[in-house]
Image: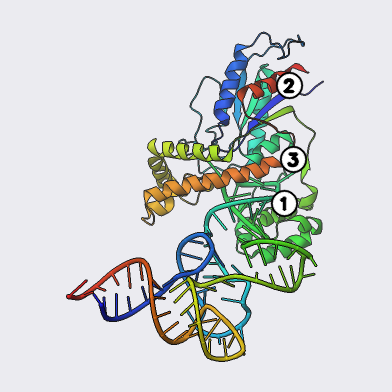
Amino acid sequence: MSRAKLIVILGPTASGKSELAVRLALRLRASTELSRMSSGQSKKRFRIKGVEIISADSRQVYKEMDIGTAKPLTRRIPHYLIDVVRLNEEFNVAIYKRLAVKKIKEIQKRKKIPFLVGGTGLYIKSIVDNLNFPKVIPQKKLREKLEKKSTKVLFKIYQKLDPKGAKIIDKGNKRRLIRAIEVCQFTKIPFSKQKKEGRALFDVLEIGIKIDKKELDKRISKRVDKMIKMGLENEVKSLVKKYSWKTPALQAIGYQEWCDYFQGKIKKNEVKEKIKLHTRQFTKRQMTWFKSDKRIEWIKTRNEAINLIRKFLEDS
RNA sequence: GGGUAGGUGGCGGAGUGGCCAAACGCACGACGCUGUAAACGUCGCGGUCUCUGAUCUACGGGGGUUCGAAUCCCUCCCUACCCA
């Protein structure tokens, strides 16, 4: 039996993923009954009962973070994995993967096409490559204890637990070291032996939005201006009051930048510029992540995407 | 016109005779990433080359002192502030 199909739409922040996804979804729905290949030779028919979207965005999962994460506003196509947890609840890739896989399967069961749409590379990878995370939930107390140690010490500890893994780990990366140690201690099995990919869950088509850097920067600038007009400041203010600057979710771009402003250290215009800058830097990091995935089909226009999708859905 | 403080790499900012192509931060570039991933980390960052080293041009301009100057002296230009 062939694997069920999944279409991934990815790209850097502000490249227009959500919009593209929704438009593609609507267009596919409209062409439900039949479709000819562009060239016209292929007469294969296929039906699409509809498309539903699953977000692959590590910030849109949080309730109340609306403006700064640019949550999609359309309700014409069902969206999932948006607003699933509160800021004080824990969330991470492993949880994401579990929820997303479940949703994808549900959609497929309804004979609809799932679109996985987002810019969080690791989240997408967790689905596409079926990453199997060591089943060790974060150990708060252990982490607190380890947090106090220097990276050098942590590295030595890790080296004893997992010599092979120690060779490839980021020596200066405390967060990674702590997790690696945590996994080793908890499972008694070296962390490096537990990083595995399972058999592919889905037949995947990855579509990436190719966009000129200058054009992207322009979009970022416009988008940030819009967010501020929409009341980002108030959104952040109320979230900080309710939770605190320490909650991981608020480290998000568009949120953290207000910290200094609320303390009177910088002007509002500087906040805006910083958000833009950080967003630009972020998109670069996203691109270096995506670059390594050679399966991604980079497209510039909606039609290119449509053609790829039609072809993908046809040959089954 | 007088006085004071300054002028250092794309920016901020150390250095005040040799260890200086110049700390550190930012920006920029490249990369990594398996339970915080919009997070976190690593590397590079004057030019050229036979690139774990060599060489050239560099610390406002010019001149000087010295074996040796971003650092000391003279002079000019510029900036900020204060007094007229």
Front residue of A69/B67: it is B67
> Which chain is home to disc 3?
A
Check disc 1 and report its element: helix, strand or loop.
helix
Q: Residues within 10 Å of mark 2 (few under 14, many from 20)?
A: some
Asked whether the residues under marks 2 and 3 belong to the same chain, the reply is yes
Q: Is residue B54 left or right of residue B80?
A: right
Please say if the residues under marks 2 and 3 sit with CB atoms less than 8 Å apart. Answer: no
Kindly tell me whether residue A252 is visible in this rendering: no
> Amino acid under label 3?
Asn
Q: Residue A160: x, y in percent? A: 78, 62
Q: Residue at x 56, y 47 (%)?
A: A281
Q: Residue at x 61, y 60 (%)?
A: A147
> Amino acid under label 2?
Phe
Mark carried by residue A132: 3
Which picture quadrant has residue A111?
top right
Residue at mark 1: A183
